[in-house]
Amino acid sequence: MNGNKCLSCHSRANSARTQATMISITHYMDRDGQPLAAVSPRRYFCNQCHVPQTDAVPLVGTSFEIIDKILQDDANAAQKR
């Protein structure tokens, strides 16, 4: 809860040992593109952008729909008119 467990496998320091995909070098840059020694604070919370790989029940519900489904639903509704 108080640490980023993703980095225990996916950081530059650990990816070779764990055989996990290393996170992008862009995660080690500040907003001006300058390299950092550690993961940027802006990129530390992986689940803001990436889907967690677990079967745990989400803490917050979602009504997310992919754009293809939304467009298809709109096209179907237009055909019925």
Image: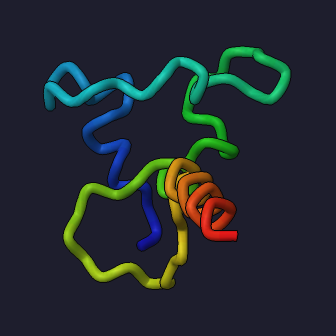
Image vertical order of residue 61 relative to residue 30, above or below: below
Q: Residue at x 76, y 15 (%)?
A: 34
Where does the C terminus fall, quadrant-wise? bottom right
User: Residue 16 in the image: x percent, y percent?
Assistant: 20, 19
User: Residue 43 in the image: x percent, y percent?
Assistant: 61, 42
Image vertical order of residue 69 relative to residue 27, above or below: below
Q: Residue at x 34, y 24 (%)?
A: 22
Q: How is the protein colored in the picture?
A: rainbow
Q: Nearer the viewer, residue 40 or 48?
A: 48
Q: Nearer the viewer, residue 49 or 7?
A: 49
Residue lying at the far right of the rendered structure: 32
Q: Residue at x 46, y 69 (%)?
A: 2
Q: Nearer the viewer, residue 73 or 39?
A: 73
Q: Toward which corner of the image does residue 48 lie, by quadrant? A: bottom right
Where does the N terminus fall, quadrant-wise? bottom left
Q: Residue at x 25, y 76 (%)?
A: 56
User: Residue 77 in the image: x percent, y percent?
Assistant: 63, 67
